[in-house]
Image: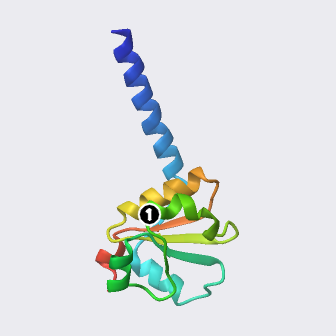
């Protein structure tokens, strides 16, 4: 019975930590992304975390492809002095990428909700 309470406490703690970390990630729509892309791009760095094949088939000008599964070895390619904008196909992989960046010390991160599924 004590083991059950410990497991439950650990699960609750992990959920709370995940929620707290996600609060530091801003989420925008593809419409808001278009507004950013039409303005001053200097404060931003744009990354697409889809596979190379997905990226090649349909990409947004100005985005660099760093697949999610290679991010850990390529963190130095993400500048800490810019707002990082992340996109994927649906918003799930880019959300995961944003959490990885938070854990690595990045603080200014934007995830594009809906991803390329909503890009027109």
The residue tagged 1 is: 68
Q: Tell me the quadrant of the picture where the C terminus can be found.
A: bottom left
- How many marks can you see? 1
Visible residue check, residue 27? yes
Q: Tell me the quadrant of the picture where the N terminus can be found.
A: top left
Residue 59, above or below 4:
below
**Percent position (x, y) of residue 68?**
44, 63
Residue 8, above or below 60:
above
Between 73 and 58, which is closer to the camera in this rendering? 73
**Percent position (x, y) of residue 16?**
47, 37
The quadrant holding residue 67 is bottom left
Please tell me whether mark 1 sits on a helix, a strand or a loop: helix
Q: Which residue occupies 38% across, 10% down?
A: 2
Left or right: residue 48 compared with residue 75: left
Left or right: residue 37 compared with residue 44: left
**Percent position (x, y) of residue 55?**
38, 79
Between 39 and 49, which is closer to the camera in this rendering? 49
Left or right: residue 31 compared with residue 40: left
Q: Which residue lies furthest to the left in this view?
A: 117
Q: Which residue occupies 57% across, 70% down?
A: 84
Q: How crowded is the residue under tag 1: few (<14 C-alpha within 10 Å), some, or many (20+)?
A: some
Residue 87, above or below 57:
above
Q: Which residue occupies 46% across, 79% down?
A: 33
Q: Which residue occupies 39% across, 78% down?
A: 30
């Amino acid at each position: 019975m004590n083991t059950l309470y410990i497991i439950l406490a650990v699960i609750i703690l992990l959920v709370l930590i995940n929620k707290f970390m996600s609060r530091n990630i801003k989420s925008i729509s593809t419409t808001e992304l278009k507004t950013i892309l039409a303005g001053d791009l200097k404060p931003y760095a744009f990354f697409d975390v889809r596979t190379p094949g997905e990226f090649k088939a349909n990409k947004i000008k100005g985005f660099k492809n760093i697949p999610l599964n290679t991010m850990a070895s390529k963190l130095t390619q993400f500048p800490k002095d810019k707002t990082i904008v992340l996109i994927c196909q649906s918003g799930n992989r880019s959300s995961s990428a944003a959490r990885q960046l938070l854990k690595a010390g990045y603080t200014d991160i934007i995830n594009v909700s809906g991803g390329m599924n909503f890009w027109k």
